[in-house]
Image (cartoon, rainbow, N blue to C red):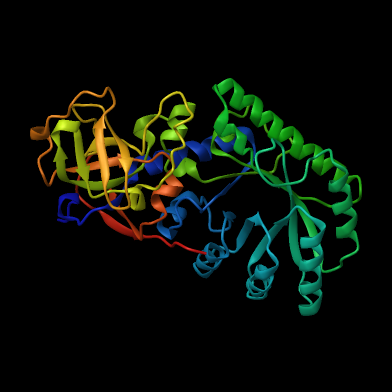
Amino acid sequence: MKTLSSLETPALVLDRVALDRNLARMSSRMSELGVGLRPHVKTAKSLDVIRRALVSPAQGITVSTLKEADYFFEAGVSDILYAVGIAPGKIAHVLSLIARGAQLKIAADNIEAVRAVAAAAAARDVIVPMVIELDVDGHRSGVRPDSDLLLELGREFKVHRHLRLRGVMTHAGDSYNCASTDAIGDMAEQERAGSVLAAERLRAMDHLLDIVSVGSTPTARFARALDGVTEVRVGVYMFQDLVMWNLGVCQLTDIAIATLVTVIGHQAERGWLITDGGWMALSRDRGTAHQAVDQGYGLVRDIRGLPTEEDLLVVSANQEHGILARRDGMPVDPARYPIGTMLRVLPNHACAMAAQHAEYQVVRGSSIEILESWPRINGW
């Protein structure tokens, strides 16, 4: 029997019980709201995880890189939405995937990108399905639903016979900045209403849209209704993290991944423990720093994922060193954490923590027995 204590650290641990509970909860939630679920694979980047997230082989996925599209298409998942605005240098890659049989849809929020795709598609005589990316909250990229640019894009699609405008998509990323669950519910309605408005304006131009796609884990959790929406794209919900916990989206016990680290030194006069898990293993993400509870670079648990005697945080991180201290600033008793002690660090941002690791060490709950190792991909 292989156990966590036999591993070289840092290593990425995945609790299969929490994962499956998170997947079932979101699937049930989408059924209640009457919309499709298009899981976003950018968090997990693992076929073993995503197979558990898909209720049927025909269910579609969302990707953030074309490498993800290649990986999952080769594994038999063909319905793919690439939810990042297309760059001209990636159009040939997109056309190759479509030519191989992928039902790939790409996004744009500007006329230049639409024209670039249209020219390349015409040269190859390939039909390219597309969606218009919307900005419903000023968070990032996209077209405002009530803007003139939306109609200009609608007219542009009309003149290119190698393009098919399938719908609209958005991401209410500003939900991560909400101060209450009621505010997240309001943001979900803003996301829904903006997307439906944009779709109605385009349909009035005789575009036959079948996709109205929204998505963020907080708004999916607290949406009051999703009338007019066809699908929700979410990814963090699979693993959850400390940002989600601070927002009230999940419980601490729902956080399914952690980085396993080892105590390699003590700085007793400073009240520190030193581990071999720095920002390369944990990420530099400090997403909780501006929330009500700052979790440093991550909240510490014991090797079984259970609370430690003190409330320990990773308070500082270098490339390969993590510095642990008590939240209350009191000294840590080094005798409780001798050299070689293994600890788990919960992520501020699950996507970022997982990004540097090549595989998941899969366990069941608080057990340290490793059931399986699941590979994941990285890069672009």
Q: Is 139 displayed left or right of 118 in the figure? A: left
The picture places residue 350, in percent across and down from the top left corner, at 42, 44
Which residue is most to the front? 269
Q: Is residue 247 visible?
A: yes
Residue at figure coordinates x 52%, y 70% from the top left: 74
In the depicted structure, whether residue 329 falls above or below residue 263 = above
What residue appears at the point 12 percent right and 47 percent down from the top-left corner?
A: 340
For image coordinates 55% across by 21% down, the residue present is: 180
Q: Quadrant of residue 269?
A: top left
From this viewpoint, which residue is outermost toward the left? Answer: 335
Res. 179 image quadrant: top right
Residue farthest toward the bottom in the current orientation of the protein: 124
For residue 173, above or below residue 205 = above
Q: Position of residue 195 (x, y in %)?
A: 75, 39
Q: Quick check: 274 left or right of 40?
A: left
Q: Position of residue 363 (x, y in %)?
A: 27, 48
